Image (cartoon, grey):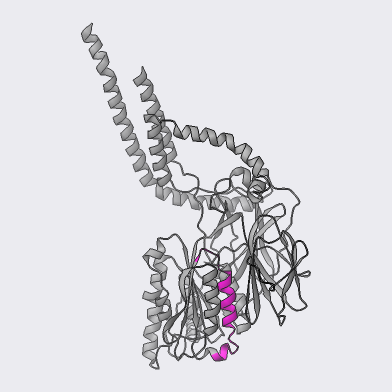
């Protein structure tokens, strides 16, 4: 009888395991880890396009805003590339080194060897296996120029667009290109960005450089921001914010100061261990640990708050399907919420969270949608099908009552038509080098600044579970009382000896976790329109195609598990018959 029950227990266990393998498992967290490499042109022509060396303050601000724990490096290039800031993990020491090293940038080179710069900063197979998102920000004002010989320049340009760029494509790295002045080789820079799914922009002059650098940064890392009140020049710091980085455009004010949440004055002097002030010729970047909750205000007649990046108890994990699409092509974003350790929030902690996405083309809003967060899954927001080419700004907001975090992204839409012969000839430079002709190059007459997005803030209080996450010190006793008893039960269960069936269950669960693919899910608000439902259905169909492709090998595993089940059944039957035979012989 015991053997019969054991056989039934093992059979039931393997049956449940088969069902688990044949269905997708809960999705794993998206990765926000970054590896960013910045390439700065220092050829002699930059003396004309950037006479005031505004690359220096722009680079200083950029490096101070890189998230801690990411990897980064800075190179300058002209005839040959040279390391400015060694590639390594971003921390306070790395950022201080970057602030000092960037001051040494000067335009003394003769040529502009973009291919050599990309080769020097290229990624390898080891970089690809570190589960980091790989990005390059490239700034130049000129053409591919390696020699006075036109034929040599043509060969260098072809090498750049083929074998060199292919290395970046192979490892999945995105190259974001910035052309400083319209004399830059827009065809080449656009082709580099488009083929690696990066973004290309042109700065009319160096004054626009920082804004473009910040947009490139927004499309590279997931930086959570809090909204700025433009008239009052103030912003709200909530409980649970561990650190914030404030960027101020000085406009001549060298004595930047704030009032904090308690209306105390905050200045550079006296120096405080929890505050880091980095000053450039144009901007002040202030990083403050454990800022006082409440409303902070900038005190200045001329300075302007540019942005406030924050780091807190909640991580926003985001993945954008494409940054370059063609007219009529679909795209989407996936968003997840996790705690500081990268663990996805539970269903109770997600209660009340909404995702809001607004899109504009620089002049007007073209799309806005809200939806609830899916529980324990990626929340997918389908973006609209766009029929007009151009650059679109995405404002992504995560909202729960008064808690508001925003992320900015860009989406470039290219026309379907290829370049005409006349356009191709006009785009070619005097060296008559070939240009990429997949789509026309789109360049706005000037980079547009998107208008601030107005977000409705509710006074609704977050759930108790979310409060426990955000305000751990305030609910520590209550949380401990609730958790202690279950923890003791779990500990007792862990120390108890496991049966053979339990060991089989653990082994099968481990196999399932490794082999099951993440699920994609969408949960929309009840008041969504039929168009929203249709687009969501289309997204589900796209996911189904990916799932079907992985079902073949999954069924091989199911077949193997079934074979193991059959062997176990045969063994158990045979061991069960031996005692019966002995009993009959004795009789």
Left or right: where 138 falls relative to 387? left
Which of the 4 image quarters holds residue 66?
A: bottom right
Relative horizontal placement of residue 128, taking residue 228 as reference (left or right): left
Confirm whether the magenta stretch covers residue 140. Answer: no
Residue 183 x %, y %: 53, 87
Instruction: Tell me residue 152's x, y (percent).
Output: 36, 88
Q: Is residue 190 above or below residue 14?
A: below
* 476 and 249: which is toward the camera: 476
Report if residue 204 is visible in the image: no
Residue 501, quarter of the rendered image? top left
User: Left or right: 420 with respect to 515?
Assistant: right
Look at the picture and state if 257 lies above or below 341: below
Residue sitting at the far top: 587
**In magenta segment, residue 51:** yes
The image quadrant where one finds the C terminus is top left
Q: In this view, does 500 lie above or below 555?
A: above
Magenta extent: 47-70
Position of the N terminus, as image quadrant, is top left
| Observer-nearest of 361 and 517 | 517
Please count the marks in the image. Answer: 0
Q: Position of residue 545 (x, y in %)?
A: 45, 51
Q: Which residue is drawn at 38% across and 38% down?
A: 507
**Front one among 136 and 300:** 300
Q: Residue at x 46, y 35 (%)?
A: 494
Residue 157 at x, y percent in the picture: 41, 82
Q: Extreme left residue here?
A: 585
Task: Answer whether residue 261 is visible to the viewer in this image.
Answer: yes
């Amino acid at each position: 009888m015991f053997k019969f029950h054991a056989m039934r227990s093992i059979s039931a266990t393997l049956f449940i395991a088969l069902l688990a393998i044949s269905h997708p498992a809960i999705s794993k967290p998206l990765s926000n880890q970054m590896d960013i490499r910045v390439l700065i042109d220092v050829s002699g022509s930059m003396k004309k396009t950037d006479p005031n060396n505004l690359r220096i303050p722009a680079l200083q601000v950029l490096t101070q805003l890189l998230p801690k724990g990411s990897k980064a490096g800075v190179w300058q290039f002209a005839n040959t590339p040279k390391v400015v800031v060694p590639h390594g993990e971003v921390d306070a020491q790395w950022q201080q080194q970057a602030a000092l090293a960037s001051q040494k940038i000067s335009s003394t080179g003769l040529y502009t060897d973009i291919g050599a710069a990309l080769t020097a900063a290229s990624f390898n197979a080891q970089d690809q296996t570190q589960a980091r998102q790989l990005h390059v920000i490239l700034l130049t004002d000129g053409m591919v120029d390696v020699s006075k010989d036109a034929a040599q320049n043509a060969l260098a340009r072809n090498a750049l667009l083929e074998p060199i760029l292919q290395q970046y494509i192979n490892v999945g790295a995105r190259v974001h290109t910035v052309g400083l002045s319209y004399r830059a080789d827009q065809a080449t820079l656009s082709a580099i960005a488009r083929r690696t799914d990066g973004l290309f922009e042109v700065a009319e002059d160096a004054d626009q450089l920082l804004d473009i650098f910040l947009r490139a940064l927004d499309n590279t890392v997931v930086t959570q921001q809090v909204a700025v009140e433009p008239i009052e020049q103030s912003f709200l710091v909530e409980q649970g914010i561990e650190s914030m980085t404030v960027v101020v455009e000085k406009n001549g004010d060298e004595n930047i100061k704030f009032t904090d949440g308690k209306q105390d004055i905050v200045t550079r002097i006296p120096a405080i261990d929890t505050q880091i002030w980095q000053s450039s010729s144009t901007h002040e970047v202030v990083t403050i640990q454990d800022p006082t909750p409440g409303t902070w205000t900038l005190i200045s007649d001329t300075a302007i708050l540019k942005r406030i990046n924050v780091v807190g108890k909640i991580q926003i994990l985001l993945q954008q399907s494409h940054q370059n699409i063609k007219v009529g092509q679909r795209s989407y974003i996936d968003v997840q919420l996790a705690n500081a350790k990268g663990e996805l929030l539970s269903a109770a902690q997600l209660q009340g969270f909404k995702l809001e996405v607004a899109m504009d083309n620089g002049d007007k809003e073209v799309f806005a949608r809200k939806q609830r967060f899916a529980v324990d899954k990626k929340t997918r927001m389908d973006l609209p099908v766009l029929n007009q080419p151009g650059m679109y700004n995405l404002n992504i907001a995560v909202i729960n009552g008064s808690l508001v975090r925003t992320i900015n992204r860009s989406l470039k839409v290219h026309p379907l038509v290829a370049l005409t012969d006349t356009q191709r000839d006009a785009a070619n430079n005097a060296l008559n080098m070939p240009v990429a002709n997949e789509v026309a190059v789109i360049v706005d007459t000037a980079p547009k600044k998107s208008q601030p997005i107005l977000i409705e803030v509710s006074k609704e209080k977050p759930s108790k579970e979310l409060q426990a996450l955000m305000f751990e010190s305030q609910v520590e006793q209550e949380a401990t009382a609730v958790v202690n008893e279950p923890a003791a039960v779990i500990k007792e269960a862990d120390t108890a000896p496991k049966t053979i069936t339990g060991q089989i269950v653990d082994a099968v669960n481990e196999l399932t976790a490794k082999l099951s693919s993440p699920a994609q899910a969408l949960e929309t608000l009840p008041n969504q329109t039929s168009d929203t439902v249709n687009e969501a259905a289309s997204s589900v169909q796209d996911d189904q195609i990916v799932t079907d492709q992985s079902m073949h090998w999954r069924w091989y595993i199911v077949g193997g598990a079934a074979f193991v089940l059959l062997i176990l059944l045969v063994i158990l039957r045979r061991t069960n018959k031996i005692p019966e035979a002995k009993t009959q012989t004795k009789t």
